[in-house]
Image (tube, rainbow, N blue to C red):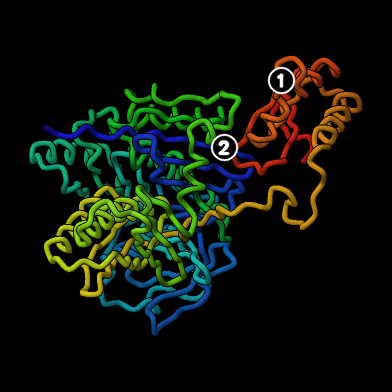
């Protein structure tokens, strides 16, 4: 009997500066992403009009200015087959030209030779259209490609191309012919496409709608290309929220909870385009408790991102991350389930493999990962562990390779590295001194809070206040049904006053907000 697919919940926490995205599988955190709201981040999929700064003949590559402090890098092989068509399009574009006509009449020409030299194609100061395929990491700038692609749920649109490719995972020859014929019939001149696995069984209206939306997104950049020949962004990938939906949305997705109305509407609109029948799974979270506390995301982040990661029955991992290498050490701890040393080591290693596969996705660890498993003598156990690790990694969307255990019990895993490893500081300030080394008397904390409430009510005329506190302080202020501090303040100042407990706050931390959710004492 086939096992049931796990339920996937997407929990999106929108804050003024960042959007945090947590993917839960059976209520367990397996992916965590943070998207800056500042708009100055150089992300995978973003497309820029860049300027060639320096040609590197020895590397057959060039440095390109895309507006980042660190210059981006492009290799000759990343120029794409029809770079000359893109180049002509940029050079002939101007504000007096009908850009759509110009695009459609440019011939693709001969593809670039594989053994060509970059100095024969690019010159210093040349403007090129380029897309980020790898984000800046440490001292290195972004990695670019000049072969632009716009990814949708079912279709990947390829400007200045003619070929229509189909995912190998679609096995039915009849379905492949149907999809190829349909997509070719709706693509205008100078467009190619890749038909993704998700397109299998989709009707014509869905594919036509998505293809037209991708074409509009590409053509909307024409105005920017025509009007300005300066470095700048042409368009961005979808937000991380919609990118996660695009790549992961399937029948096992049960709920998407978002605490911001605008982002919720954006997600609902996107799902109505790619999978209309699932629009109902998008929900606006309106609870008083912070969304990540309500869904226990905060607690899982705190327990999962430390240097030491605990597992069941006393075993634990120690994770060390450097710029070039990630090292994971497996420890059995106090676990002694069986007197058989070999069997015990095998069981702990299997348990560790499950957590390691999760940690790689959760932290988005890339590059080389070395895992030091507990030593085993039995070759059958070693082979079984390798096979088990390979199976666990099948759900990982990043390109990866798992190698068998060495004689020293080490396993090497390589994983596609397109952005820096996600690092979260799980250590907190001292709850008493707040990092200063000096403390206030805890018996006057209620007086300090009341003074703030009094100021905003009497001096500023605020009539509705939300007081955010740590769970311990919140319990202290609400202690006693009729004689609690909360009750006294409500009666004394004749205001609407609520306490919201935030798991992330240290013991005495407190913040005051108005009815619009704006912080008053920040």
Tell me: residue 396, above or below residue 132. above
Query: Hey, which residue is sitting farthest right in the picture?
Result: 459
Q: Where does the image place residue 11, in percent across and percent down from the top left?
A: 46, 35
Tell me, for residue 480, which label it has, or none: 1
Front-lying residue, 364 or 144: 364
State left or right for residue 416 relative to residue 517: left
Front-lying residue, 289 or 165: 289
Tell me, for residue 14, which label it has, or none: 2
Q: Nearer the viewer, mark 1 or mark 2?
A: 1
Tell me: residue 121, above or below residue 435. below
Q: Where does the image place residue 520, in percent across and percent down from the top left?
A: 78, 34
Q: Secondary structure at mark 2?
A: strand
Neighbor class of circle 1 (other Cα within 10 Å; few <14, some 14-19, many 20+) is few
State left or right for residue 244 relative to residue 204: right
Disc 1 and disc 2 in contact, CB within 8 angstroms: no
- The residue at 35%/46% (across/down) is 151
User: Taking the image as drawn, is residue 148 in sight?
Assistant: no
Q: Secondary structure at mark 1?
A: loop
């Amino acid at each position: 009997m086939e096992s049931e697919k796990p339920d996937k919940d997407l929990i999106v926490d929108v804050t003024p500066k960042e959007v945090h995205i947590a993917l839960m599988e059976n209520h367990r955190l397996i992916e965590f992403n943070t998207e800056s709201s500042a708009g100055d981040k150089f992300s995978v999929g973003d497309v820029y009009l860049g300027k060639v700064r320096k040609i590197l003949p020895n590397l057959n590559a060039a440095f390109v200015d895309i507006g980042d402090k660190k210059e981006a890098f492009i290799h000759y092989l990343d120029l794409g087959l029809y770079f000359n068509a893109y180049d002509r399009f940029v050079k002939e574009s101007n504000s007096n030209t009908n850009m759509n006509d110009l695009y459609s009449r440019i011939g693709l020409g001969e593809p670039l030779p594989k053994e060509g030299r970059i100095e024969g194609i690019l010159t210093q100061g040349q403007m090129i259209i380029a897309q980020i395929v790898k984000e800046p990491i440490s001292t290195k700038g972004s990695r670019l490609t000049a072969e632009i692609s716009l990814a949708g749920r079912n279709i990947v649109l390829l400007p200045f191309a003619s070929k229509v490719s189909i995912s190998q995972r679609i096995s039915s020859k009849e379905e492949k012919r149907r999809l190829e014929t349909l997509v070719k019939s709706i693509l205008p001149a100078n467009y190619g496409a890749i038909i993704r696995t998700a397109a299998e069984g989709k009707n014509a209206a869905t594919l036509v709608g998505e293809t037209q939306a991708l074409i509009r997104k590409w053509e909307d950049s024409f105005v920017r290309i025509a009007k300005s020949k300066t470095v700048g962004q042409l368009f961005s990938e979808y937000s991380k929220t919609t990118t996660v939906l695009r790549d992961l949305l399937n029948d096992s997705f049960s709920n998407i909870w978002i605490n911001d109305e605008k982002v919720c509407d954006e997600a609902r609109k996107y799902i109505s385009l790619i999978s209309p029948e699932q629009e109902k799974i998008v929900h606006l979270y309106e609870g008083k408790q912070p969304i990540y506390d309500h869904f226990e995301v905060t607690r899982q982040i705190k327990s999962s991102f430390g240097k030491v990661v605990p597992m069941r029955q006393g075993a634990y991992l120690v994770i060390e991350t450097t710029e070039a290498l990630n090292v994971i050490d497996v420890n059995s701890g106090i676990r002694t389930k069986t007197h058989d040393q070999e069997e015990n080591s095998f069981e702990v290693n299997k348990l560790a493999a499950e957590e390691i596969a999760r940690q790689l996705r959760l932290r988005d660890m890339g590059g080389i990962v070395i895992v030091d498993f507990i030593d085993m003598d039995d070759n059958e156990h070693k082979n079984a562990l390798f096979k088990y690790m390979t199976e666990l990694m099948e759900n990982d969307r990043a390109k990866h390779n798992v190698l068998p255990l060495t004689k020293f019990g080490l396993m090497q895993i390589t994983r596609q590295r397109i952005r820096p490893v996600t690092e979260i500081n799980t250590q907190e300030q001292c709850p008493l001194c707040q990092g200063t080394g000096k403390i206030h008397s805890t018996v006057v904390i209620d007086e300090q809070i009341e003074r703030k409430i009094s100021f905003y009510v009497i001096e500023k005329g605020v009539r509705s206040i939300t007081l955010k506190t740590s769970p311990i302080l919140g319990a202290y202020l609400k202690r006693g049904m009729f004689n609690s501090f909360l009750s006294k303040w409500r009666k004394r100042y004749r205001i609407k006053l609520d306490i919201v407990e935030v798991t992330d706050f240290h013991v005495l931390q407190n913040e005051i907000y108005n009815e619009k959710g704006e912080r008053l004492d920040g």
